[in-house]
């Protein structure tokens, strides 16, 4: 029986484990793939306080080493369900694991919606990026492409246009779906151009390095090659919260519908990080959620134990 089980090994989950262990609670972290979450896609992290520059992978490794040093247990399994039994919870995994605890922190994060192109995943962090705040500086004075046409894509492109030589927007619809005010602000800039009604059909590489994309123009069927130094993708995020909707309400987009307290409708179940409804999704806000959720879980465990 653990005091707290953390589902997810990203920055939110590992920070939660750290704070729970520092408060003397027994902790198990269950991660299905690899520790670090989305941060591992960043070749350099330069916005984490106290660290001038570090790779996302190195930061994740450091965080994992820290929680192991603090005595947290880890399991590489996929959580299939969480059963609320009142003062205890049962966490079951697809691999057959069954773990008991007093409190659960769900920190499953999100995954970026991909274009679905051959070789795409190999280029993530090596020419393909998802975050202008995180990676935009690496493309200062260079040419970049932006896939997407909603508010997120427009906002990212505005940030990139301040630094990059050129920004080319690629939208599969015949129009941009983002707010008109953002469109006016973005397309008023001389270094911004766009294609609408196009589909990205392939990635261009040379010696394994990203060089651009191939697009198909729907209206004419024309195939065109666009060369660039980087491709930013903003076509949506996918939370993976469906297995836990019996414990925590989901909003219309599938995120846990909880506020900064990280408390859900189920006593002893908390949600932290990118998987919950929030305005800003960064490594620092994920870590902050982990802190809040862990301390709330620790208080709950103390109440249970009396």
Image (cartoon, rainbow, N blue to C red):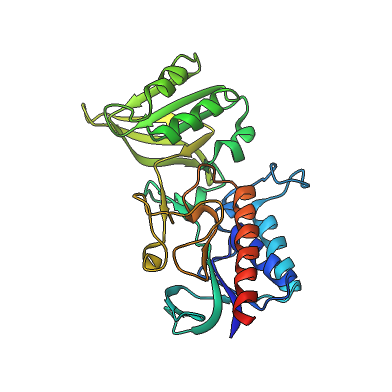
What residue is drawn where x is 55% and y is 53%? 38
Query: Where is residue 69 shown, x and y percent of the image?
Result: 76, 72
Q: Quadrant of the N terminus?
A: bottom right
Q: Dividing the picture into quarters, in which one does residue 182 lie?
A: top left
Q: Dividing the picture into quarters, in which one does residue 243 lie?
A: bottom left
Q: Is residue 235 above or below residue 107?
A: above
Q: Is residue 203 above or below residue 20?
A: above
Q: Quadrant of the C terminus?
A: bottom right
Query: Where is residue 252 shown, x and y percent of the image?
Result: 34, 50
Side of 70 relative to 133 (left or right): right
Which of these two is toward me, 44 or 295?
Answer: 295
Total marks placed: 0
Side of 237 relative to 43 (left or right): left
Side of 98 relative to 140 (left or right): left
Query: Where is residue 125 shown, x and y percent of the image?
Result: 56, 47
Query: Where is residue 116 shown, x and y percent of the image?
Result: 36, 50
Which of these two is toward me, 197 or 25?
Answer: 25
What residue is drawn where x is 57% and y is 51%? 41
Which of these two is toward me, 268 or 43?
Answer: 268
Which of these two is toward me, 146 or 89?
Answer: 89
Q: Is residue 211 above or below residue 81?
A: above
What residue is drawn where x is 46% and y is 73%? 78
């Amino acid at each position: 029986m653990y005091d707290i089980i953390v589902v997810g090994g990203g920055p939110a989950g590992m920070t939660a484990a750290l704070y729970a262990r520092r408060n003397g609670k027994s902790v198990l972290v269950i991660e299905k793939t690899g520790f670090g979450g989305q941060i591992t896609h960043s070749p350099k992290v330069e916005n984490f306080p106290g660290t001038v520059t570090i790779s996302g992978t190195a930061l994740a490794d450091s965080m994992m080493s820290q929680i192991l040093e603090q005595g947290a247990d880890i399991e590489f399994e996929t959580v299939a369900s969480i059963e609320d039994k009142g003062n205890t919870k049962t966490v079951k995994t697809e691999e057959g694991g069954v773990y008991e605890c007093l409190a659960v922190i769900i920190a499953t994060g999100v995954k970026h919606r991909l274009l679905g192109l051959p070789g795409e995943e190999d280029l993530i962090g090596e020419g393909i990026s998802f975050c202008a705040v995180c990676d935009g500086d690496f493309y200062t004075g260079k040419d970049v492409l932006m896939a997407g046409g909603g508010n997120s894509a427009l906002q990212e492109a505005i940030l990139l246009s301040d630094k990059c030589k050129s920004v080319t927007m690629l939208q599969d619809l015949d129009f941009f779906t983002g707010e008109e005010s953002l469109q006016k602000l973005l397309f008023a800039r001389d270094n911004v151009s766009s294609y609408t009604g196009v589909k990205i059909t392939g990635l261009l590489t040379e010696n394994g390095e990203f060089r651009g994309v191939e697009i198909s123009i729907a209206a004419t069927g024309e195939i065109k090659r666009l060369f660039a130094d980087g491709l930013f993708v903003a076509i949506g995020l996918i939370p993976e919260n469906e297995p836990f909707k019996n414990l925590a309400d989901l909003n219309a987009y599938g995120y846990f519908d909880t506020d900064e307290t990280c408390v859900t409708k189920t006593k002893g179940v908390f949600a932290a990080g990118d998987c919950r409804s929030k305005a800003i999704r960064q490594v620092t806000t994920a870590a902050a959620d982990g802190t809040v959720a862990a301390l709330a879980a620790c208080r709950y465990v103390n109440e249970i134990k009396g």
